[in-house]
Image: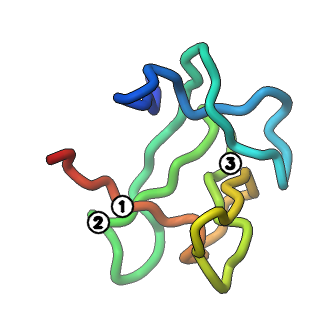
Amino acid sequence: NGWFIKSSRSGKYLGIECSSNNGTAVIIVSNPYKWDVKDSDVDGVHGIGYAILVHGTNNSLDLSSYVGSANGTKVQLWGSWPGANQIWALVERQ
């Protein structure tokens, strides 16, 4: 199975344009790109925090700056590990 992450504004998808290696930039693409969404393995965030991985791999969406999340921080792929920079919350659209 898997998920597509689509912008409701542009109609484009979150994806990558090359192989899914550590440091690969996550960008907006025209064609659907498949992701796996899994409950995080981190204590205290089960059921509210999720890892988003390239379908069928262990490569997670990752904020490139572990210590910060300022506007403009690069979102990239990185091998999954229980770091806060790889945990995402799914927020209901208002």
The mark lying in front, picked from 1 and 3, is 1
Q: According to the image, label 3 marks what residue?
A: 58
The amino acid on which the numbered mark 2 sits, given as a three-letter code, is: Ile
Q: Nearer the viewer, mark 1 or mark 2?
A: 1
* Amino acid of disc 1: Ala
Q: Secondary structure at mark 1?
A: loop
Q: Is residue 20 visible?
A: yes
The residue sitting at 62% across, 81% down in the picture is: 68
Residue 32 image offset from top left, x and y in percent: 55, 17
Q: Label 2: how many residues lie within 10 Å, few (<14), some (14-19) or many (20+)? A: few
Disc 1, disc 2: CB below 8 Å?
yes
- Number of marks present in the image shown: 3
Residue appearing at x 68%, y 79% in the figure: 66
Measure the C-alpha gap from mark 1 to mark 3: 19 Å
**Residue wearing tag 1:** 89
> How far, Cα to Cα, is label 3 from label 2?
20 Å
Q: Where residue 25 sits: x, y (%)? A: 77, 46
Residue 57 vs residue 34, the one in the foreground: 34
Tell me the number on the disc at residue 48.
Answer: 2
Along the line of sight, which residue is nearer the eye, 53 or 66? Answer: 66
| Residue 37 circle label | none
